[in-house]
Image: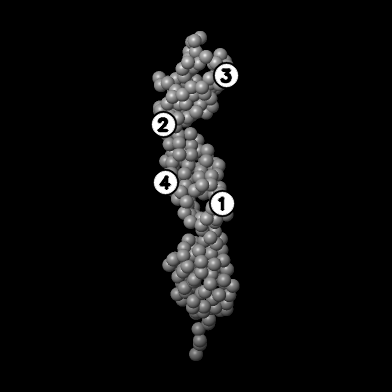
């Protein structure tokens, strides 16, 4: 007498399909000592029932005028608890991979990013990975995980646009580095790195349109300034020029 599914939420409410023989006159279905909250006699070989609340593993039995069946195991699963998500942002087009950590994730069947869902890959009961679906618009959305035990919310993910650079001021400085530079553009609030001529520079995000950086040492001449965020990189070609100090 197989059950499908053979597990469900501790809060009950799972529609379970029971298959077997001589089931057409079913009068009761029990999950352990508790009766199902609804029974539907589909045919002589199939009955559906809605699970009551419960915990742990219980035996499911079917009763007809001919007697009561042997119990078949059914497992109650608690709702998932999500502890962390990373990375927490990415491009509007999606396709990047996010890792979610928590507990009760082994039976995860879907992860929703706002209104869009994706099928996860279960690594363990405490970890799953998922490819982020495309977003509807830039900004933050709620993330929810659905398992056999239910759905849990509480995390957020931000869809960000690719960065752009408008100005780099000042646009020149000594080869020794140390020049404070203000970079303006768009989608700079989630900046992950700034490089001058391929060398990483210390930086701080001022707001979504401004980043401050300090130039590293570099060889004399014009170099590219590259700003990267989770959605991609933008190159301001030759935007900063290293100047050799005068000699006397």
> Residue, x 52% and y 74% (percent of image)?
167
- Give the x, y percent position of residue 125: 47, 38
The residue at the far bottom in this view is 248
Q: Secondary structure at mark 4?
A: strand
Callout 1 environment at 10 Å: few (<14), some (14 to 19), or many (20+)?
Answer: some
Callout 4 environment at 10 Å: few (<14), some (14 to 19), or many (20+)?
Answer: few
Q: Is residue 218 above or below residue 144?
A: below
Callout 3 environment at 10 Å: few (<14), some (14 to 19), or many (20+)?
Answer: some
Question: Real-space Cα distance between discs 4 and 1?
Answer: 20 Å
Q: Nearer the viewer, residue 192 or 16?
A: 16
Q: Secondary structure at mark 3?
A: strand
- Give the x, y percent position of residue 91: 54, 56
Mark 3 or 1 closer to N-term?
A: 3
Question: Real-space Cα distance between discs 4 and 3?
Answer: 42 Å
Q: Are the residues tagged 4 and 2 within 8 Å (C-beta)?
A: no
- Per the image, the residue denoted by label 2 is 11
Q: Of the numbered discs in the image, which one, if any, rests on residue 154?
A: 4
- Per the image, the residue denoted by label 1 is 134
Question: Real-space Cα distance between discs 2 and 1?
Answer: 32 Å
Quarter holding the N terminus is top right
The residue at the far top in this view is 66
Q: Is residue 126 above or below residue 63?
A: below
Q: Are the residues tagged 2 and 3 within 8 Å (C-beta)?
A: no
- Per the image, the residue denoted by label 3 is 43
Q: Secondary structure at mark 2?
A: loop
Q: Is residue 155 above or below residue 235?
A: above
């Amino acid at each position: 007498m197989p059950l499908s599914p053979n597990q469900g939420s501790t809060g009950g409410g799972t529609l379970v399909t029971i298959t077997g023989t001589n089931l057409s006159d079913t009068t009761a279905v029990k999950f352990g000592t508790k009766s199902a909250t609804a029974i539907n006699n589909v045919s002589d070989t199939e009955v559906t029932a809605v699970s009551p609340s419960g915990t742990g593993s219980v035996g499911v039995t079917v009763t007809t005028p001919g007697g009561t069946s042997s119990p078949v195991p059914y497992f109650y699963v608690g709702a998932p608890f999500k502890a962390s998500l990373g990375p927490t942002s990415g491009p509007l087009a999606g396709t990047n991979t996010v890792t979610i950590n928590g507990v009760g994730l082994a039976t995860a069947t879907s992860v929703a990013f706002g209104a869009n869902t994706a099928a996860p890959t279960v690594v363990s009961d405490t970890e799953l990975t998922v490819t982020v679906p495309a977003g509807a618009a830039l900004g933050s959305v709620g993330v929810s995980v659905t398992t056999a035990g239910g759905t849990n919310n509480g995390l957020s993910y931000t869809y960000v646009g690719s960065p752009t650079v408008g100005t780099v001021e000042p646009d020149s400085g000594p080869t020794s580095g140390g020049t404070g530079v203000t970079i303006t553009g768009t989608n700079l609030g989630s900046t992950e790195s700034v490089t001058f001529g391929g060398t990483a520079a210390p930086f701080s995000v001022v707001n979504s349109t401004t980043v401050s950086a300090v130039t590293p040492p570099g060889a004399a001449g014009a170099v590219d300034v590259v700003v990267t965020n989770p959605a991609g990189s933008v190159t301001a070609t030759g935007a900063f020029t290293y100047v050799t100090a005068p000699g006397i």
